[in-house]
Amino acid sequence: ELQLTSAVEAFMSCYPDVKKAIGASEKIFEYLDRKPQMPPDGSLAPQTLEGHLQFKNVTFAYPNRPDTAVLKAFSLELKAGQMTALVGPSGGGKSTCVSLVERFYQPQEGEILLDGKPLHNYKNQYLHNKIAVVSQEPVLFARSVKENIKYGLEEASDEDMFSAAKIANAHKFINDLPNGYDTDARGRSGGQKQRIAIARALIGRPQILVLDDATSSLDTESEHLVHQALLSSSHCAILLITHRLSAVEKACHIIFLQGGEVLEEGSHAELMKKGGSYAQQVQKQNTVFQRNKEGVI
Ligand code: ATP
């Protein structure tokens, strides 16, 4: 009996730790649950692809929070040769749209169509080649700039590499590096890394290009040049996600997403005329920009 009592006492003394450990493991499982599932493979791999992407009334909740819809009856359309911008406050659901385009998750309601066919009916590898996503902090390898741009497409010619780098407004700065395209990619600035990553995405000639805050480290002028070149030299459909509203003026369609819902949409001129949330945000950013320029803050 004595032994049993001391065993119980021993257990009780470490109970808080056990409880903590259980709490921690629950957190770990919660974290693991956040991991997206490997999407099942489809069979579609058509020879030609238009690049027409549509979200139709998409409602989506993450698997670990099934009761919280992060996108609510959300619709979006991307067309070849056009730029559509997704803007809005943090947590609005912009990056979630990217995860759905990348097929990390499936919407619970509505559909995502590529050239009129459900995205999940396409072959994973095919989509991987046709849809390029460039993120805010791209991963570069400890290799030359050239190897980084040609990564996964080593058979690409130098000419292809140059034209991709030109569109990404990277050709000039790369040429100015000590060993040009053979220079080690390490030690590049944030803006240079982003442009190398855009060149890497473009060399594969994707039909759809998603720029997820991918030019945030560039100055406004350089960002503008990249967007201009993308629109005039590549024929892909571009989805531009950004917090910097001066970057979206050229987009043919702007969607202001808040709390998973489209609050406003239209061209820059239309939204400015409307004088709603988008216009207020533009005004606010312009004021901050002006003050920064004048050295006020
Ligand atoms: P930001 O501008 O800060 O990047 P965002 O508009 O891209 O924000 P999302 O990152 O899509 O917004 O987030 C939308 C909502 O989904 C937020 O409430 C966020 O907490 C939640 N969320 C994002 N990723 C996950 C995840 N993997 N699991 C659960 N919830 C998530």
Image (tube, rainbow, N blue to C red):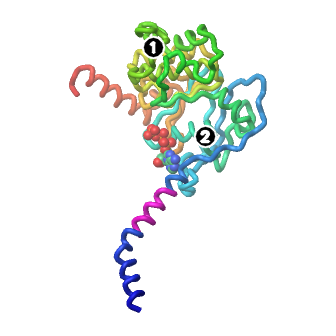
Q: Amino acid at mark 1?
A: Thr
Q: What residue is drawn where x is 61% and y is 11%?
A: 160
**What secondary structure is the magenta-colored segment mainly?**
helix
| Closest to the observer, 61 or 184 | 184
In percent of width and height, residue 281 lies at: 39, 33
In percent of width and height, residue 27 lies at: 46, 58
Q: What residue is drawn where x is 71% and y is 24%?
A: 50
User: Secondary structure beneath disc 1?
Assistant: loop
User: Secondary structure beneath disc 2?
Assistant: helix
Q: Please report whichever mark, 2 or 1, sits nearer to the chain's N-terminal start.
A: 2
| Closest to the observer, 195 or 116 | 195
Mark 1 lies within 8 Å of ligand 1 (Cβ measured): no
The quadrant in which the N terminus is found is bottom left
Q: Report how far apart the C-alphas of labels 2 and 1 lie in the structure.
A: 36 Å
Q: Quadrant of residue 223?
A: top left
Which dot, 2 or 1, sits closer to the camera?
1
Q: Horizontally, is 214 left or right of 283 in the view?
A: right
In percent of width and height, residue 71 lies at: 56, 46
Q: Quadrant of residue 293?
A: top left
Question: Which of the labelled discs sits on residue 204, or is there none?
Answer: none
Q: Are marks 2 and 1 in contact (CB under 8 Å)?
A: no
Depicted 48 relative to depicted 19: above or below: above
Residue at the disc numbered 2: 100
Residue at the disc numbered 1: 183
| Closest to the observer, 191 or 9 | 9
Part of the protein shown in magenta: 19-29
The quadrant in which the C terminus is found is top left
Q: Amino acid at mark 2?
A: Leu
